[in-house]
Image: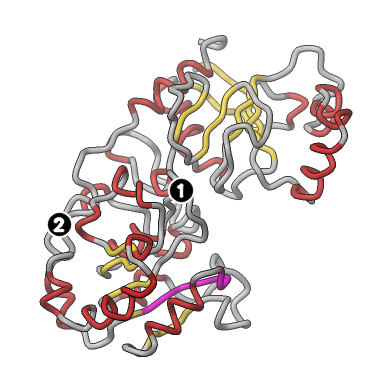
Amino acid sequence: MKKIKVSYIWGHPNYKELLIPKIIKTFFNFEIIWTKPSQSDLLFVGPYKKFGKIIKKITNKYSFFQSQFFLNFDRGLSLRKEKPITVFYSRENNRKDYEKADFSITSDFNYENDPLYIRIPVWKDYCDWSEIGLEKSPINTLNAQRFGEHYSLKKLMEPIGTEILKKKARICCFFSKLYFPRVEHINLLKKHFQVSEYGPAFDNQIKSHNHSNFFKKKVMEDFTINYCPENEIFPGWYTEKIPDAFLGKNIPLTWADTNISNDFNSNCFINLNSFNSDELDNLFTELQSNEYLTKFLKEPLLIKNINLEKEIKFCETILKKFI
């Protein structure tokens, strides 16, 4: 088995469980040795640099901090003659050039067909790919630690079913922070429903959404609808929110970029971004009707098979020098 030294800085706390490292191990038969950047063959760079936003302002203002010397120093590579291959791998709403790298991975659509870039939406990293040979991640990693399980591709391709209409409770929501327009939507929803609120935004005893005293999937068992807006509107930025609601047997009531139909079947969720503000009151009135809700329950979230063909090909390009 071939060996490759890999490092990941400023990245996702469960970076070893993300798709690309798993593909490298499984499909290219590499033993990954996790090490420091100064010893790595392959360096993944994330967006979570300490004081990142402040540093970004400084580097944009002063050209010296944009130099290759400073970049190598910042990443612990200044003493190396031969630099590792670098990959910017973000699970946040960042652009592909947020950090300079040889390759990049974000959630943006690849409009330019850039061969050095690939789009991996956040939710795809949270799927269980064990059926095609990737090692299943522990339950206490990735999104499963707050939802309660990794996403089943089979379940994502099955309708929720009308059994959920037998539930008495209607709407729940889970938030760490109340970004715009969450407060406005919740206040309007409360004119029509009792809205049950969970998470650090409503309970200061909860340290974070990864350290709560519940699994979202379990809580959703009592509800029909999950109000699950994205925290930002941007093409391609579709996270765990809709799949969480769908697999929790709730109708997703979201607020997201309207290109979301590229990923998910828009016939099984409601996107508030598709409505004018003066239409919302009527919409929320309709949400009280089982007849209205039924039409969202008969279709799957995914209407086409998804695979990892592009991700495997992308890894092959990254690893070309080592194969």
Q: Which amino acid type is shown beneath numbered disc 1?
A: Trp
Looking at the image, is 16 positioned above or below residue 72? below
Query: Where does residue 74 sit, x and y in percent of width and height?
Result: 82, 34
Q: Secondary structure at mark 2?
A: loop
Q: Would residue 15 be found to the left or right of residue 126 on screen?
A: right
Query: Where does residue 284 sit, x and y in percent of width and height?
Result: 29, 79
Q: Residues within 10 Å of mark 2 (few under 14, many from 20)?
A: some
Q: Nearer the viewer, residue 28 or 80?
A: 80
Looking at the image, is 88 positioned above or below residue 14? above
- The magenta span reads 172-179
Q: Who's the residue at 45% across and 52% down the image?
A: 138
1 within the magenta span = no
Look at discs 1 and 2 and give the one toward the viewer: 1
Total numbered labels? 2
Looking at the image, is 133 positioned above or below residue 3? below
Q: Nearer the viewer, residue 113 or 207?
A: 113
Whether residue 222 is visible to the viewer of this picture, yes or no, is no
Which circle marks residue 237 in the picture? 1
Q: What predominant SS class does the magenta segment belong to?
A: loop
